[in-house]
Amino acid sequence: MAKLRVRIDRDQCIADMVCVSLCPDVFEINEEDGKSQIKAQWRIDPNNPAEGEVTEELKDCVTSAAESCPVSIIHVEEVS
């Protein structure tokens, strides 16, 4: 089963919470800076909230969040 790599350019995040609204299983708002981040369970590196890998079951969710982001800072790609 393929996995999906999800990256957020947190420096460009405007914290509108569209990604959290559309895909709360993967995205959350960082309480300190108010910007979007990947939930800890999906992070590749526990200390990097901007990059994660999710299962194929979440493809529609993360794709919808990426396509709906008003500043296009969420990137999704398949990895083997």
Image (tube, rainbow, N blue to C red):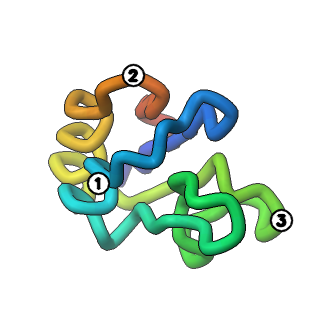
Disc number placed over residue 47 in the picture, else none: 3
Residue at 61% across / 32% down in the picture?
A: 9
Compared across the picture, whether 29 is left or right of 45 comes to left
Residue at 29% across / 54% down in the picture?
A: 56
Label 3 vs label 2, nearer the camera: 2
> Which numbered disc flags the more N-terminal residue, 3 or 2?
3
Q: Is residue 41 above or below residue 64?
A: below
Nearest the eye: 51 or 71 = 71
Kind of residue sitting beneath label 2: Ser
Tell me where residue 57 sits by quadrant.
bottom left
Mark 2 Cα shell of 10 Å, populated few (<14), some (14-19), many (≥20): some
Look at the image and tell me in which quarter the N terminus lies. Answer: bottom left
Kind of residue sitting beneath label 3: Asn
Q: CA distance from mark 3 to mark 2?
A: 23 Å
Disc number placed over residue 56 in the picture, else none: 1
> Which numbered disc flags the more N-terminal residue, 2 or 1?
1
Q: CA distance from mark 3 to mark 1?
A: 23 Å
Q: CA distance from mark 2 to mark 1?
A: 21 Å
Q: Residue lying furthest top in this view?
A: 72
